[in-house]
Amino acid sequence: MHGELVVLLVLVGAGGFLLLAERTQIPYPILLTLGGTLLAFVPGVGKFALDPNIVLVAFLPPLLYAAAFFTSVHDLRANAVPIGFLAIGLVTLTTVTVAVVAHAFVDDLSWPAAFVLGAVVSPTDPVAATEIAVRSRAPRRLITIVEGESLINDATGLIAYKFAVAAVLSGTFSLADAVGSFVVSAVAGIAIGLAVGFAIAEVRRRLDDAPTEIAISLLTPYVAYLPAEALGVSAVLAAVTAGLYLGWRSPDLVTPSTRIQITGFWEMLSFGLNATLFVLVGLQLRTILDGLTGYSAGQLAWWAAAVVATVVATRMVFIYPFNIVARLLVRRFPRKRGDQPPDLKLTGLLGWSGMRGSVSLAAALAIPLTTHAGGPFPGRDLVIFLAYSVILVTVVGQGLTLGKLIEWAGVYDDEETTAEQEARARIAAANAALERLEELHDEDWVREETHARMRGTYEFRIRRFEARIDDEDDGDIEEGSQAYQHLRRKVIEAERAEIIRQRNRGAITDDIMRRLERDLDLEDARLEI
């Protein structure tokens, strides 16, 4: 297939999956996985080979950085124990068990290649699980643990992957050296990430230009990842650490208008990278299957089933005993409420949320074509096929059933608690605004009528949110607020229509129209209706 047609197919495929996800309300990772698989069998799609050297560098840094940037540090800290055990203990166990089963069942798969497979499928991906969990009103803690686990286990799994690939390429491996290198690699990667995060924060603190800041935010994961990779330390942890640090500092570094633009940019970029990865693997799947012609369909299906079953079973076997032991330890050594182990229902849902996704896919596609000796990488096509089978079954199978399991378990988020937290935070913010208003009251540039009008606005806001946490409230204040917002939106729509008419008549330029539209859009976005 011509390069231009490949690019066109990638773009059309990604756009089509996004439209279908919006129409069907099915989380887009599920459709990406299915769609990428179907692309391999589209008539006219010939053999397609992707350079492994560009996969990890091109795709992983921004995906890891974005996941870290939007992760809550408080939530990570509050759930550090379960996240740590899952991200380190479970990843290690999955790598080993998958390697043992794959070596025992899959013909011609050496021990090093089997460990590469284990490392590839060991880290989880949170996108499908969290989308389904949020849509199903699952407890916030489930989402937090799934997101935190996937963030940390990306680093653990990819460090293990790096050592396993190096063992295949060189033909040698030392467990003692690997453990020592693991610790040094992790510490050095974190240090580089912190250094880059601090330096970028100092630069961005002095900027107030959205395009420039967006460009710097795009470069940041590569600035952290590439030096760490060149030094042979954990580039993954460098990108993740930089993302966590800058995500924590971002409220002090970014203006409101820039924050809106950057958030939209990263949401679109993350989707685009995920979509592109799945489309590319679909295009390459035909080449991979052609490399497996020496095996029957029955053999491949049996091996895939064995590996998938091992991945799922290992997680469930690990997670329940860990939960029971954690509960016994809590009874003996009580800890704060946020650090309690999940209950058994939540544990089951957590076990079923272990889907694999873009990180495993990128790692599989990045497996080198040849070893240092010049021969082909042993079992490369088999490893990619089996890894993709795990992704396909876990994302589609578990993804389509997770919502039903949440409904069956009856474990939902406490919406009252969440609403109360939000209302109290808004009340505190409004009180802070009133205090500042009083401090500024006697300034020469503050007019009395402006001060009174603004004070009235904040006093109404406090009454409104106090009513939300008052069990005896009759709802009159909230009803009035909703009516006002409904009227405000109708008026904004009239403003927007008039601005467009002014542009169409040539009374204003398109640039002016867009500036005015942006102001109206920001006002409209604040409305809760």
Image (cartoon, rainbow, N blue to C red):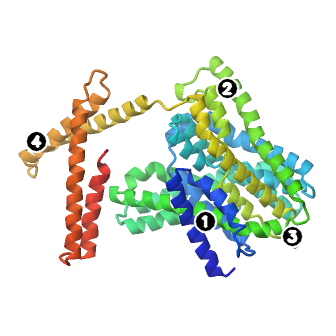
Corner quadrant of residue 492: bottom left
Q: How far apart are marks 3 and 1 (CA)?
A: 26 Å
Under mark 2, the amino acid is: Ala
Which numbered dot is residue 452?
Answer: 4
Asked if residue 93 shows in the view, the reply is yes
Q: Residues within 10 Å of mark 1 (few under 14, many from 20)?
A: many
Q: Give residue 148's position: percent from left, percent from top.
A: 59, 43
Label 3 or label 1, whichever comes before in sequence order:
1
Residue identifier under label 2: 326
Q: In the shown orientation, is residue 468 left or right of residue 241?
A: left
Which numbered dot is residue 376?
Answer: 3
Query: Quick check: marks 4 and 3 in contact, CB under 8 Å?
Result: no
Q: Is mark 4 on a helix, strand or loop?
A: helix
Q: Distance between the residues labelled 2 and 1?
A: 40 Å
Q: Residue at x 53, y 25 (%)?
A: 337
Residue identifier under label 1: 276
Q: Which residue is drawn at 20% across and 39% down?
A: 458
Q: Give residue 183's position: percent from left, percent from top.
A: 72, 48
Under mark 1, the amino acid is: Thr
Residue 458 vs residue 231, the one in the foreground: 458
Q: Residues within 10 Å of mark 4 (few under 14, many from 20)?
A: few
Residue 42 vs residue 120, the one in the foreground: 42
Q: In the shown orientation, is residue 521 left or right of residue 453?
A: right
Q: Is residue 271 above or below residue 408?
A: below
Q: What element carries label 2?
A: helix
